[in-house]
Each structure stands twice: as structure tokens, then as C-alpha cells.
Image: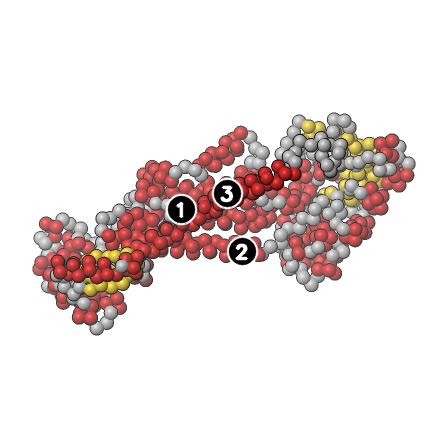
Amino acid sequence: MTQRELLNDGKHAIEIRNLNVYYGEKLAVKHITIPIARHKITAFIGPSGCGKSTVLRSLNRMNDLIPGARVEGEVVYRGQNLYGPDIDAVEVRRRIGMVFQKPNPFPKSIYDNVAYGPRVLGIRDRRALDQIVEQSLRQAALWDEVKDDLRKSGLALSGGQQQRLCIARTLAVEPDVILMDEPCSALDPIATQRIEDLMKELSVDYSIVIVTHNMQQAMRVSDYTAFYTTDESRIGDLVEFNRTEKLFSAPSDPRTADYIAGRFG
Amino acid sequence: MSENNPTRQSNLPDDQTFERQLARRHTRSGVWRGIFLMSTLMGLIALVALFGNVINEAFGTVAFASKLTESEISDVPLSELDGPALAALLGEYAPRRLRVIVRDELSVVSAAEFTTVPVSVALAHAEMPESMADRTITELSDEEVIQLLALNLSADQLYDHVQTDVIGLELLKSWPLSTTLFDYATIQAEFDALVEEKDPPNPHLEFRSWLNWDFVTGSQSSYAELAGVRTAIVGTLWIMALTMLIAFPLGVGAAIYLEEYARGGGWFDRLIEVNIRNLAGVPSIIYGLLGLAIFVRTLEQLTSGAVFGVTGVNGRTILSASATMALLILPVIIIASQEAIRAVPQSIREASYGLGATKWQTVWHQVLPAAMPGILTGTIIALSRAIGETAPLIVIGASAVIFVDPGGPFSKFTALPVQIWQWTARPQEEFRNIAAAAIIVLLGLLLFMNSFAIILRQRLSKKL
């Protein structure tokens, strides 16, 4: 399918349309158009500085937190432009959750880490919170390891466990879409494996976008892949978007072919 | 050509020169090491000298003379007697002083009028039985005057009067600790000469720790040997508590605004920031003048408590002092809190926002708890600075001598550093002794506050 066809088949969690992101005066990425398929895993790959994280962070308006960051174009979610005038970024981030590069649990107990999101949304009932915490930890495949010690600090867990805790924390506010910004780059291969398995399980119910440096990872887990690169003026640009097996087996752009063959980046 | 690398032309010294230079380089670094060690030692010496001086003054030998001794007038130690018993002792041994004490302590009229107007007029604020009200002080019997004293003076005050008027303990001379320890013969000789010359009653030498429990818990007195610092301690504690109450929320609030809301902001936010940094360096006496103008004068209605129905005080109150101190330490608290807030990793904020938390929820639930140990440390350091500040309090008008403990924000006050300053300014030798003792009390208070801060900080960080 071509990009246009993919955009039009109506099965999209998010549609990125002609997105430009600026940091101050500097254009960081230009003319990005990507559909994010519902209940699939979409991978963003490319060399450092190509803007893949920038695009990811503009999907839940995380870029708003950076002074001087500015966005042109549209990010359409449920028929609404997320950068429209009456869209509340707080609401957006609850629907479109995020898992970060470095595991960043709050310096609180495991329980409080997971319960934080629901509490922020105003849930005070103890029983409801207990249920949410257990369900989220089970979904993140962490429950069996921590169920006896929920009062333990989240920082006392191993790196891989911390990252799954962060995923559980995201699941607790019941998002539609989960954005993952190189979620395994700080983890060892075994922990990485567990996160990848987890992503596949989660993609049954959630739409996932993952930024990764690791092409093998993109190949292993994703259904669609977007390849970005930079031009001479260091502006990030989308080179190619396609089904993952297609992009890796028969890239249509020579730059993609060079990159996946390891000739640069 | 270098030996190791024949293709490279070397401009470096050959091995022989190198070795000669190496010795010189080592010597030079040895000299610098010595200089740095000296600097450290100088600091240490200064510290030892400071403590040595204070301790030297706070302990030592004193020569007393007294008209009577305690055991001659009472079977029980005087300090255990209550007000009426002390008043009775005054009546028994110093009947001629009774009316003088009433005049000095209670009279609201001039000395000339005191003996001619009825006591209800002369002692307008005093409690008295109806039967006395219409007579003049000279028409009252000694027993009635004793009753007046017992009704209106505290046991502390009466104790001081028994000491001065009955026992008549007179401090002849005091010697510092160093003389006591290393040159007692001189003390003995000087004492003998004194006795020879003045022939005082009941002369004796005793070792005295000027810092003692009576000193810490005793009230003010114009006699060094009877004076205590309780009113000053209470004043200092009141001021510190109120200062904290005012400065902490304001300082943390400002830091939150500057760090979380105004980050990368416009010229106005930057202007505020630069100004706060400069304010931290303004001399404290300037803050005193500011406090005098704003809190004592302009806001007198508020700081004297007049708007709350408190009467009889001016603006020179604990509230004014606290507000001034709060202004003084506010920049320090703001800067320390800003640094603590800035040290909270951005990833924690992002995680919180990423879950759909608002700015305020993120600040309140994540940033502040993580920054709290640093904020508290900064606050306590600022308070430690404030506790020793003298100049602003003097400008604001700390009372020279007050006998009543400050009881609230609208009380007149004195504070430890002010007290120390006043005592050191007196010509009599023995006031330097109690000033030294008061310095030890102040340092002790400081140490207590700092250890409290450390404990608090560790308990807060452990919760993570």
C-alpha cells in the first residue's frame, strides 16, 4: 500500500499530517506525514539527530514542555487535531501515554508509582486503586515479581523491572496509544527481550509507536517502520514509510537501503 | 629525532633535562602544598582562639562579699522559696528597702508624687486589696507593703531583691579561666589586697561557671551575677519561629514560580532573578532600616497589634523583627530552593506530565517532595544566619532590658545577640563574663537547630 492508501483506510490511531517542528528559529523536522495504525506497532528508525524522537514527542504534546518549541501541521487523533485551539495537552497525554529512554520511576513505592496516574485523575477509593495497580502490573508482566513487596521503592528494582514499572504506570491511566522513546537502550539483552515480548502482547489492545536505534529490534517487533534521515542542513526528514518486512526486504529509497545495510548511521 | 618514534621530530626536553626539571617541579608542588596547609591551619587557629576566648571569659574565679549569708537567713535554699516567703524575708531583714522596691518596680508616677498620692493612683496597674487603695504608701504598714510585693512581683524578681537587698552579695572582682588555672597566686594576692583596702563583710573567693542553669533560666538583672538570658532565649525562639513561618512559604513559592513557571521567560522574569541574587548580598543593617520604615513605622497599626485590639505597645514588636528577618533571609531561601528544584531530574517531571498530570500536580506531588531536603537545608542555613543577626534588631529597636518573657507576636522583645552586644558594651568586667556565657548559649542553640535540620533532612530523604 502507498502512504496515501494507508492514510485513507480509516484504521488509524493517529495521523500525522505534514508536520513541521521548530526549536526556536531552527526547523528540526519537516513535512512529516505518517499514519499510525491502530493496535499495531510502528517503529521510527534513523541515525542520531534525524528528528524521530522529536516527532514522537509531538504526538502527545511533550514538546510543549520545551521552551521555544513550535509545531506546524496536524496530528489527528479521533478526528481532532491535537494542536487545535481547544485541545488540552493534559487530556492528550492521558490518552497518549509515554515510556522514556531511561527508566524514570518516581522516587516512591511501586504501588504509588502505578497509582500516581489514577490519583492525579481524582481516584481516591482504596479498593479501586488496588485493583488498578494489580491489573496494570499484571499487564506489564511485573506483578509476579513485585506482588509481595509493593511498598518497596520503585528505584530499588532492576533496570528492566523499572522500565516495566514505567509501562505499568502508563497503562494505569488507560491510554489508547503508547509512545516509547528507545525504551530498551539502557537495558541488557534479556531485559530487552522481555520488553519486546511485552510490547507484542500489548499491541493486541494498544497502538504503539517506538523509536529505536536498533534495526533488529524494529524488524523483530514492529508492523510498520518509518525511516528518517537528515539532509545537509540538519533538518530531519521522512525518507520512507512502509510495512516493516517490505521496508527491510525491498527498500524503495537508496538511502534506506544504505542505512539498513549498515553503510551509514 | 625522537628515539621512540623516529619519524617524529621532537621538541621536548631530552631525558637528562627532563629529570632535572622533574625534581624542580616536585619541589614547587611541595611548596604549594605547604601554603595550602598553612591556610587551613590559620583557619583552625582562628577557630580555636575564638572558642578559647569565649570559654576563658565564661568560667573563672570571682570574689564576693555579702552582708549576710544565705544560711543565716533561711533554712531552705532561697531559690526554692515562693513569692510570699521571699517577700517576708525582705520585710524581716530589709524593712527600709520595702517602699523603695515598690517604687522602683511598680510606680507609674514621679518619685515626688509617689509618697503623697493614694497607692491606687501611684500603682495604677498593680493588684491590691480595696482596703489599701485610698491611703498613701507611707500610711501602709510594713505587713501591707509586703503583701503588695507578694501580689505583684514574680518569685524571680523577689529572689533578686533578696539577693541584693538582704544578702547584699557584692561582686568585688572576677578573673578569667586562664588566670584561675595558671596563676592562682596572683588572684590570691589581688584578693588579699582588696580585702585589706576595702574591708568588705564576709569576703570569699569561689570558682564560678558564669554559664549555669540559673543563667539560662534566669531573667534580666542589672547585676551581672544575677542576670539570666531566659527572656532573650524566648525572644530569639519567637523571632525564629515567626521568621520561618513568614519566609518559608514565600521563599519556596517564589522559587517554584521562577523555576517552574517563568523558565526561559522574558526580560521581566530575568530582572526579578538578578535582583534576588543581588538582594542576598545587601548588608543586614539596610534591612533593619527597611524594617524600621515599613514594619515599625508605616505598618505600626498592624505590627503593634492595634488592629487586633492589643494596646499599650508600639511597632517595635516580635512581629516587626520577624518580618524584617524574613525579608533578610528570603533571597537566600529563594536561591537555595531554586537550586534544589533545578536539581530534580527533568525525567521525573516528564513522567508526571506524561501521565496527564497538570503543572501544579507535578510540582506538588513530584518536584517539591524530591526538592524538599535541599530546600530545608537552605532554609535552616538561612535561619542560622538570622539567629545571629544583631544589627537589624537594634535598628528596629529591641528593648535594652525587659523582665517579662515575650508572650506573642505583639510583645516587646530582646534577643540573644542583642543581649550579648549590650553586655559587651558595658564597662564592668563581669558583664564580659556573662556575654561570653550568652555566646555559648547562642552557639548551643545554633548547633541544636542545625542538628535538627540534618535529622529532618535524612528522614525525608530516607522515605524515597
Residue drawn at x 77%, y 52% as measured from the top left: A191
Disc 1 target residue? B386
Q: Amino acid at mark 2?
A: Gln
Disc 3 target residue? B31
Spatial distance from mark 2 to mark 1, Cα to Cα?
Answer: 23 Å
Q: Earlier in the sequence, mark 2 or mark 3?
A: 3
Disc 2 target residue? B458
- Single out the residue that lies furthest toward the front: B16
The answer for which chain carries disc 1 is B
The answer for which chain carries disc 3 is B
Quadrant in the picture for the N terminus of chain A: top right
The answer for which chain carries disc 2 is B
Dot 2 falls on a residue whose secondary structure is helix
Residue B271 appears at what percent x and percent y? 50, 31
The answer to whether one can see residue A265 in this image is yes
Q: Is residue A28 left or right of residue B50?
A: right
Residue A99 appears at what percent x and percent y? 72, 46
Q: Nearer the viewer, residue B342 or A7?
A: B342
Dot 3 falls on a residue whose secondary structure is helix
